[in-house]
Image (spheres, rainbow, N blue to C red):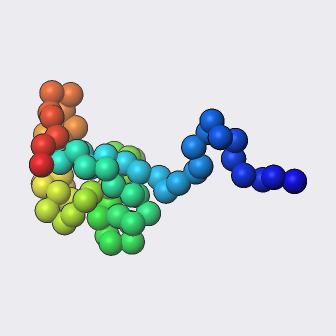
Amino acid sequence: MDLSPPLNEPAPGPATVIDPVCGMSVELDAARAKGLTLTHEGVEYGFCGRGCRLEFEDDPATYLSPGYVPAM
């Protein structure tokens, strides 16, 4: 019996999120392990590094604004 996923479906991988400050893709479990997550209004955000986390923590409204474009 073959238990591998069908060829047309991607194999499950680590959950990723987008850093709201810089736009980088971040593995959520790795960010949690490094203390690089923050929950704001019931939503958990993951960050690529301490600087992005601190920027977000100081002013989350800026980074959650519909007009904000993440940039590195």
Residue in the foreground of this view, choosing between 17 and 56: 17
**43 sits to left or right of 4:** left
16 to 29, vertically: above or below: above
The quarter of the displayed image where residue 6 is located: top right
Residue in the foreground of this view, choosing between 22 and 41: 22
| Residue 39 visible in this rendered orientation of the protein | no
Residue at horizontal 12%, vertical 49%?
72
Residue 60: x, y in percent? 19, 46
Residue at horizontal 21%, vertical 28%?
66
**7 sits to left or right of 32:** right
44 to 69, vertically: above or below: below
Which residue is situated farthest in the right direction here? 1
Residue at horizontal 31%, vertical 46%?
18
Residue 43: x, y in percent? 38, 47
The quarter of the displayed image where residue 31 is located: bottom left
Residue in the foreground of this view, choosing between 24 and 38: 24
The quarter of the displayed image where residue 63 is located: top left
**55 sits to left or right of 41:** left
Residue 62: x, y in percent? 13, 40
Which residue is situated farthest in the bottom direction here? 34
Counting labels gives 0
| Residue 71 visible in this rendered orientation of the protein | yes
Residue at horizontal 87%, vertical 53%?
1
